[in-house]
Amino acid sequence: AFVKTVVRPGLWNSLSQVVLKVTAPGIPDFFQGSELWDFSLVDPDNRKLVDFDRRRTWLGEMLAGVEARGPTAISSWFDAPDDGRIKLWVTYAALRLRRARRPLFEDGEYEPLVPRGPAAEHVFSFTRTDGSGAAITVVGRFFATLGAARPTGTVWSDTTLTLPPAVTGRRFRDALTGCILTVEGDSLPLATVFQHLPVALLETIP
């Protein structure tokens, strides 16, 4: 009975950890096979063979699904997370942006962002900036006490991020969903940012 109350928040928290690991200062360390949920404990349990064929097949199918259905496909994997596809997608999409913007994530400045509103304590966010632009990491946390069966959309109503001048009034693309956001002023509404997932990785675009 207890496990049922924490298993989904635990999976959502894992997605937040993936995005933080990819975008925080430093070099992310990925253990091969951890692209899906992995409940191994310690050696030698975590040395079992990795089914790379399944991961390649799933990723190809997911890329085709996003091409055909956009963020709706990603939402469907989030709503049925047990097979791990949603973690595979978030890992792939975050690493793809890191590779495309390597100087930004290796040498860019780090600045924390302050959330405001009723769900502020459930958000962690920061920017990485350099001369080429910026990326904003936004992830949910403390999901078990958020009080939402699905931690997206209106559960974040009236909760915002206050942005620094360097990124106000800019257009962003969420690397995880492909959604485009235009920031009006210096306030970023989280109900929009977390429309499909409770994690986001926003890159500036022209």
Image (tube, rainbow, N blue to C red):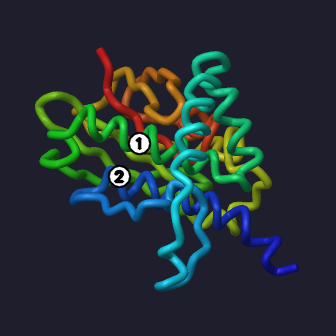
Residue 43 badge: none
Q: Quadrant of the N terminus?
A: bottom right
Residue 97 lies, with reference to residue 182, above or below; the image says: below
Determine crowd level at label 1: few under 14, some 14-19, many 20+ residues with C-alpha closer than 10 A: many
Front-lying residue, 43 or 79: 43
Query: Residue at image x 47%, y 23%?
Result: 181
Relative side of 177 to 68, left or right: left
Residue 190 lies, with reference to residue 206, above or below; the image says: below
Q: Amino acid at mark 1?
A: Ala
Front-lying residue, 67 or 194: 67
* Distance CA(mark 2)–CA(mark 1): 7 Å
| Earlier-in-chain disc, 2 versus 1 | 2
CB contact under 8 Å: marks 2 and 1: yes
Front-lying residue, 109 or 56: 56
Query: Residue at image x 55%, y 61%?
Result: 14
* Residue annotated with mark 2: 22
Q: Whole-percent x and y of residue 133? A: 21, 29
Circle 1: element type: helix
Residue 44 lies, with reference to residue 182, above or below; the image says: below
* Residue annotated with mark 1: 94
Q: Whole-percent x and y of residue 119? A: 60, 55
Q: Amino acid at mark 2?
A: Val
Q: Whole-percent x and y of residue 145? A: 69, 68
Query: Residue at image x 75%, y 45%?
Result: 79
